[in-house]
Amino acid sequence: MSMMSIRTATPKDREAIRLVEEHAFGQQTEAGLVDALVDSGDTVLELVAEEDGHVVGHILFSRLYVEKGGVRHPAVALAPLAVEPSFHGTGIGGALVREAHLRLKQSGETLAIVLGEPAYYGRFGYAHGRAAQFDSDYQCEALQALAWGEAPESGKLVYAPAFSADLAA
């Protein structure tokens, strides 16, 4: 019987992560975003899920800031989350999100933002209502937030520069 494990990503995982991202999204954009975030040092937490020694899932949280009244409050952005298509529906994505949240809370993070499917991310506590007051280029129903303590409820979301770069390879 195989067993899935989750661990911190390492430099030797780069190619496997790229493949998971490309397979999961059917394009290279998300893989390019991951490379750009890692290369720029904007990664806060990056985990992989392994099954039988092969990387089958990946999650990345990058540094994000909420600017309000001249103050920058650190937060994190969840993007991307990817699972090999042959492993969809097995719980790997959820396991990655839950493990990442535990580690982020333990490290003192207080606010996470995601732009994603509300029904999926809502299962982990993300809600558009929590993100509705943020000024963001991505403001829509899919913009959701999750707070683990004292965190801003409004302000301008400032993403890492990689999010506005042209990443098409």
Image (cartoon, helix red, strand yellow):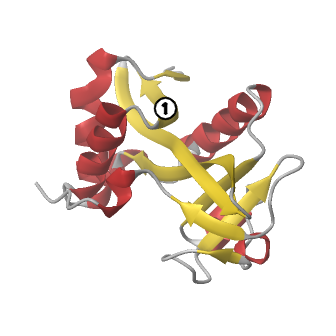
Residue positioned 21% across, 29% down in the render: 15
* Of the pair 24 and 137, the residue shown nearer to us: 137
**How many numbered marks have been drawn onto this rendered protein structure?**
1
Residue positioned 24% across, 39% down in the render: 18
Residue 14 lies, with reference to residue 76, above or below; the image says: above
Q: Residue furthest front?
A: 70
10 Å crowding of disc 1: few (<14), some (14-19), many (20+): many
Quadrant including the C terminus: bottom left
* Of the pair 92 and 157, the residue shown nearer to us: 157
Q: Which residue is mark 1?
A: 46
Q: Residue furthest left?
A: 169
Q: Position of residue 124 (x, y in %)?
A: 74, 55
Q: Position of residue 88 (x, y in %)?
A: 45, 52
Q: Residue furthest right?
A: 150
Residue 140 falls left or right of residue 124: left
Residue 158 falls left or right of residue 109: left
Query: Which image quarter: residue 119?
Result: bottom right
- Secondary structure beneath label 1: strand
Residue positioned 56% across, 71% down in the render: 117
Residue 168 lies, with reference to residue 52, above or below; the image says: below
Query: Which image quarter: residue 142?
Result: bottom right
Residue 130 lies, with reference to residue 49, above or below; the image says: below
* Of the pair 48 and 63, the residue shown nearer to us: 63
Query: Which image quarter: residue 166?
Result: bottom left
Q: Amino acid at mark 1?
A: Glu
Q: Position of residue 97 (x, y in %)?
A: 62, 43
Residue 152 falls left or right of residue 71: right
